[in-house]
Image (cartoon, grey):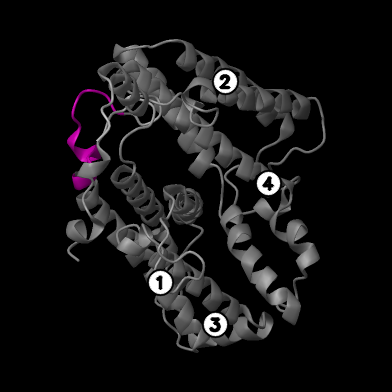
Amino acid sequence: MTHIPTDVDDTLTAVVTQPAAPSWGAGWPRWIGWATAAWSLTYAALGLFWWRGGAGFPFGVEHDPGGKGTSLLEHARPETTGPVLAGVGLGGAALAVLLSRTRRRGLLGRALAGISWVMAAGLAVVIPDYRPLLAIVRAPMLLAGAPFGWPQEVRLADFFALFLPWPVLNQILFIAGGSLWAATVVAARRRVRGGCGNCGRDDAARGWTTPAAAAVWGRWAVTVAVIVPVGYALTRWAWALDIPLGVSRAGLHKEAIESPGIWLAGAILATMAAGGALLTIGLLRPWGEVYPRWIPYLRGKRVRPRTAIIPASIVALLVTSAGLMFLRWLALGRIHLAADTWGLFVPEFFWPAWGGALGAATLAYHLRRRGACRYCGRGNATTRPSVAGATGG
């Protein structure tokens, strides 16, 4: 065996163990606050523009006919909402910069973080309604049915006009802004407690974030995130089979006559929801980490965590905002539940629980799979428990 000199051996060890310098993407904690400030300033400028009569105001039934009865801002007007949007945008930009440049502790720091979380939640899940989700789920239906001329009443060329007009695209931009705010406050709080900006870990042990703990509470989150969409799917499958589950048979037939194919479309949506529930189970199972044998070209390869985390996070946000819209309808008295109408609405009342549980399950999946941090060196990839052992097989 060739002897390696001590100084060379020490150099090799240092190279292997030295944390990697963050790339532009991995260095997001450094620039996320500035991106959030830029987003806020953009909407501040748009608020002033709309206030002064500029075109493109995306709120209120006059400018957003599709938002009648659905949008939280259906009564908004440019002359009143524009200044509010400008003021909130300017204040938000200042707050984002403050979070990025300082390490506020104590009561003030928690207050700033709380305001930021309110901004994130309001933009990402409170203001949007169910139309972004509708656009996301209708797109694959139209793409799959276009070669066969189905559905006949909707052409693929009309997709953007029907499902992604500017007011709905604006809601998607709001969801993106809310995500920026959430990332900004996470990065700020990590700096306050001296944690790694990329993985969030510090020298203090936090039991719930360990892979073993995440495997336990993540299992409960996955259970909820599977039950709710399956319950929704059962009602839509029943209607497609002419079973009046939660509705009257007369109403079922009337809708089928007035909107041919509506229950088939509902069954397709239900199947997509059930498929999502099946994929959610993958956050716990071995095939959520290694592609199974029956998938061509990918079999046996490692599933990149972001392949599951990104779509699951998007769905969690969309179903939460859609579910909150239905709960608003219930609170405002727009929904009257009865023996022959509950099936239309009650499954959707549980969508916020679905979104929250899916978000928690996705977080658990991330914590369980992240291993050692490339940038701070904390964590030990060899201590990650196997999925089978953590979930009982």
Local secondary structure at mark 4:
helix
User: Which element carries disc 2, helix, strand or loop?
Assistant: helix
Which quadrant would the C terminus be assigned to in this image? bottom left
> Residue placed at 42% from the left, 59% from the top?
301
- Name which residue type carries label 1: Arg
| Picture coordinates of residue 156, whole percent (x, y) | 76, 67
Q: Name the residue under label 2.
A: 34
Instruction: Specify start and end residues of the magenta stretch as a single range.
Output: 201-212
Q: Distance between the residues labelled 3 and 4?
A: 33 Å
In the displayed structure, 137 sits above or below 342; it is above
Residue at 42% across / 55% down in the picture?
303
Looking at the rendered image, the disc whose residue lies closer to the viewer, 1 or 4, is 1
Query: Which of the two discs, 3 and 4, sits closer to the camera?
Result: 4
Q: Distance between the residues labelled 4 and 2?
A: 23 Å
Q: Name the residue under label 3.
A: 251
Residue of label 1:
293
The three-letter code of the residue at mark 2 reads Trp
Mark 3 surroundings: few (<14), some (14-19) or many (≥20) residues within 10 A: few
